[in-house]
Every structure is written in C-alpha cells, then in structure tokens.
Image (tube, rainbow, N blue to C red):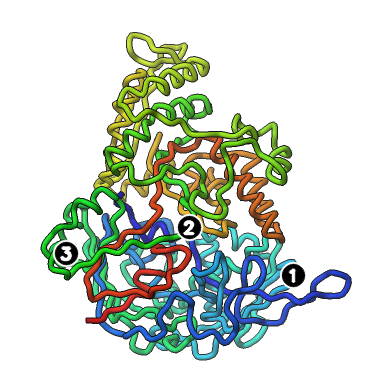
Amino acid sequence: MNRDFFAILRSFGLGLALITTPGIGGGFAQADPTHGIAMYGEPALPPDFVSLPYANPDAPKGGRIVMGENGNFDSMNPFILKGRAPTGISLFTTETLLGRSFAEPFSLYGILAESVETDAARTYVEFTLREGAKFSDGSPVTVEDVLWSFETLGTLGNPRYAPAYKAVAKAQKTGDRKVKFTFGAENRELPLLLGLRPILEKAQWVGRDFSATTMEPPIGSGPYMVDKFEAGRFVSYKKNPDWWGKDLAFYKGMHNFDEIRVEYFGNPDVHFEAFKSGDLSSYRETNPMKWQQNYGFPAMVAGDVVKDEIPHQRPSGIDGFVFNTRKPIFADWRVREALIDVFNFELINQTLNGGAVPRITSYYSNSELAGDVVNPAQGKILALLETYKADLLPGAIEGYALPVSDGKPTNRVNLRKANALLEQAGWTVQDGVLKDAKGVPFTFEILLTNGADDYIAAANIYIEALAKIGVQAKLTTVDAAQYTERTNLYDFDMTQQLIALSLSPGTEQLRYWDGANGAAPGSRNWAGIHSAAVDGLVQTMLSSTDRADFVAAVQALDRVLTSGRYFVPLWYQNIGRIAHAKQLHFPEKLPIYGDWPGFQPEVWWYQE
C-alpha cells in the first residue's frame, strides 16, 4: 500500500535511560545524572558504548540516497498542524535532548543533553546540555532555546506536543547548561517524552508567527540542512560539514550520506517507474504480489538493483477502514460489527496480496505485547477489565474474534450475520435498500487519497459487498492536502487510518484514543472513541512501575479497542521489503523494529 512512510514514524521518538539507587526501607533515593534512561529497568548500553548495536561504526561516509514519496508538500514548518511539510525535515535537520536506541523497547541516550536526572517516582527531569552543541548557523544550543522550544511546541505546535507539556508544572533554568522540568501529573514516561522533543533555535522565530506555514526551513542542530527544494516536487538535504555531533558515540555509523534527496510523485505507478529507470536508488514495496511479479526489470536482472527482506518484531498497530463514530449511523456497535462481517478479508487479501500477509487481529499483533483477545480474559487482565465492566462492549471480557469467510465472493454466512445485527439495530431492507424506521437509507462515504491504489481496490470490493445488503456506500478520492484538512476536522464517514504502535506504548495513546482529545481538531482519534475504560487503562499504563503490570494494562486496552469495533482491520507487513541500488548497504545486525525508525537512511551507507 502506498503511504507517507515518514508520517508513520511520528509515533516513535528519540531519547535517554535512568538508573535508580535503592534507598533505605525499600524506597529509592534520587538518582545521580546518568547517560541514559529506560522506561523500565536500566538501559542496555553502558556509558562508554561505542555505537548503537545495529550501526556499523566503520561505515564509509559519502554518496547519496534518493528516495520517493507519494503526495506533495506546501510548508517547511513540520511542527504545526497547518500545511504539509516535506518528508524527513525534522528527522534530518533537528535534534532532541536524547536519542532512541531501536535495539530496545524504549531506551534513550544523550544527544544534545550529556546527562539526565530524575527521581524514582519521576516527578521531575533535569537535563544537562552538552558543551559544544551548535545549530547549523554556528550558534550554541542554550537552555533558553530548550525552554522556548518546549513552550512553543506545547502551546502553538501540532496537538501531539500538547499533552506532555500540559503535565509540566514548572520549567526552570538551574544552571548555565541545566534545565529542569517538574511535573504536575503522574506519568512515568514524561522524562522520556521531553527528551524526544525537537530543539529549535529561538532567535530564528523572533517576531514571527510560529503557527503559520512558511517556506523557510527551520534552523536545527542536526546532521543535515535543507539544500535545495521545489515545493511539491523534491527536497534535497545536504550533510552539514560542520555538524557538531559527528563524533558522538550515539551517532557512530549513522548519517553516512552526503546527500539525502526525496522526490515526490502524484501517481504511485510513476513513483515505481522512476525507481526502475534509476531516478531513485531505494524503493519500499508494501505489496507482496508486486514484490514477486514486478521486479524483473533490466536493472534488477543486471544486478544493479537488489532486493532485501527485513524481519522485525514490532507491533502491527492498526491499519484499516476506521468508523467515525461521531456520525449517528456508526454509533451503534452492532452496526459496526455488521459492516465488519460484510468485509470479505480473505477474498480481498487473496486478490490484492496473493493471500501472503496476515490480518491484524490485535493492535499489537506480531509482538511480545500481543495478548489473547479471542478467549476469555484471565488474571490481571480480567481484574483490570472488571473495573470498567459497565462500559465494555460484548467481547472485551468474553473474547472477540474477527469473522472469517470461505474466500468466495458470496460470503453468505457472514452476510446473514450482518443482516441479523442490522435488523437488531433498527435497519431493514426495503425495496432493496437498507433503511431505518423512518425510511432513511443507510448511506455513507469512504474517503481516500488519490494514488492509494491498494486501499482503493479494497474499498471498491467492499462497496460491492455492501450493496448486497442494501447499503449505499460511495468512494471519494482527494489529494493529500484535502485529505489532511478533512481528517483534521473529522469531516468523513469512513476512511483509512494507520496507527503505528511501539513496543513501549505510552502518552501518545492519549492522542489516539482519549475522548477529550478526540473532540479537538487534529488529534489522531479519528474514530471518535469516548470510553471510560480506554481512558482509565491508558492512565494505568502510564503510572505502572512494573513491566508485568504495564503489559497487563496494554493487553486489557487491546481487548477494549478490538471489541470496540472501531476499525475494519486490514493486514500488516510481517517483513519489510526494500529494493535498492547495489551501492547501498546496511549492517547485518538489525534493530528489533526492523526497517522502520532509525534504519533507512540513518544506518545505511554508500559504497561501490
């Protein structure tokens, strides 16, 4: 499926790890400043580590990588809701106080901050800035830049920054290179989240409206600077020859290219043709049938292009057609279940993927966090769910399984089940059209982006099946800008949504599922979920001090979301598929997240 790959990565951050010291009477004393922080336990790497485990510290420097994205961009400000910024601009040009190791579920190590300090309860975090850290214009990174960045992003930036900043009760300069944040809410993840906030140069924005779109690139401290660009066509990132961080152990073997160029395409077929002709040097394939059938072009046959399959242990997340439950026709869970029954996954998967990819049955499929959502809840998970029993839909405690068809277009068994559920919910077929008691037809729109070929194909098959039970569904495709505007305002009935989930889910869950956030424009709660059980279980996750308790809370939340029938789940990629020029290389040791964050282009290199 064609998608903005780097948009997927926004669920992930960069950061440090904490070591606490046992205190008297079973408590914990305040920790000393340390080189890293982990969500649970201690970070895996010692203070004198040489490089991240999946980076090659001896990787050669130089060369270029040229990648492609579908869509366009009309702003160089990636930190606000307005506009559409180019791929990678924040990732390549700015830095964070801490950086994430993707060899661990959630551990962070110092980048702009040389150390981090917090207490056992994580009521505060204090960072010590690294001496010598500089922005690309040569200005030093200061405590004032950090304080301004946090406040500006938290109040004027994209809504994803707001929850963590709202939890800050006090922000203060505590030394020439020290900055401390004291929290007013219980959330053990907050020190890590603040460590992952991009740090911007305050001086660049004096007298300017940060919330407005602009075509002036941000000044950052990262390895690259925006060199050349043409709005909506391409952007070229050039390695900063004076980058202050090139010798940090965290960066050894990373950011090896002299240039990273991203080309934009309005049509996915043109995108792939550009790769075949050599205009692009890397292409990520998300369709397993195309992976098998479409790679016999001359450059591949000649050995100039190679194919690599990248295994991973990351969660599937959720990808599918999301119901906007703000709409009255989708407010009843029986209606949503009926429409899930109508979706003939087995037929669609065989048609589009040759049946080669598994279906998402849990929001954490393919990972250690995936629980058993099909059978009755037990133990800690049951105890957590019992607290919210009155708020739960059928299946949360008893177990919930997606329908399975025989793969035939008729799908008779599941269509009969769908008809029965719709009748219970007050919908009956009248003259071949599904209507309510007032005679109002059941009709809705599926909103998708131009060029999302696999989703469009799946939607068309789905619409044909819906017509068999009298549902009048129509497909509308729009450009990326219109799609962003409409989804930000929840102006849709049903659309496709992908939410990538990490091995350490935390505060970002509020943005995905929290009822209060779902009322504000720009959240990721497109489904309009408003559930006491969801909100309560997220808070339990955030306050857990023991990993076993944390996992139980995640799996309980998974059961509530799955049985909520908020999505028609599609499939997930259990391996990554990357075709690339033979001169591009990557280390043999892979991060547990595989081909996603921190992998390409970060640890790749060019070598003839």
585 on left or right of 534 = left
Q: Residues within 10 Å of mark 2 (few under 14, many from 20)?
A: many
Q: Say which element carries label 1.
A: loop
Q: Which is more foreground, mark 2 or mark 3? A: 3
Query: 496 or 386: nearer the eye?
Result: 386
Q: Which residue is mark 3?
A: 300
Give the x, y percent position of residue 195.
Answer: 56, 72
Say if 127 sits above or below 441 in the image. below
Q: Amino acid at mark 2?
A: Arg
Residue 120's disc number: 1
Say if 203 sits above or below 276 in the image. below
121 on left or right of 452 = right
Say if 216 sits above or below 483 in the image. below
Residue shown at the point (46%, 38%) measured from the top left? 567
Location of residue 225 (image quadrant) = bottom left
Give the x, y percent position of residue 424.
Answer: 52, 16
Q: Which residue is mark 2?
A: 314
Q: Amino acid at mark 3?
A: Met
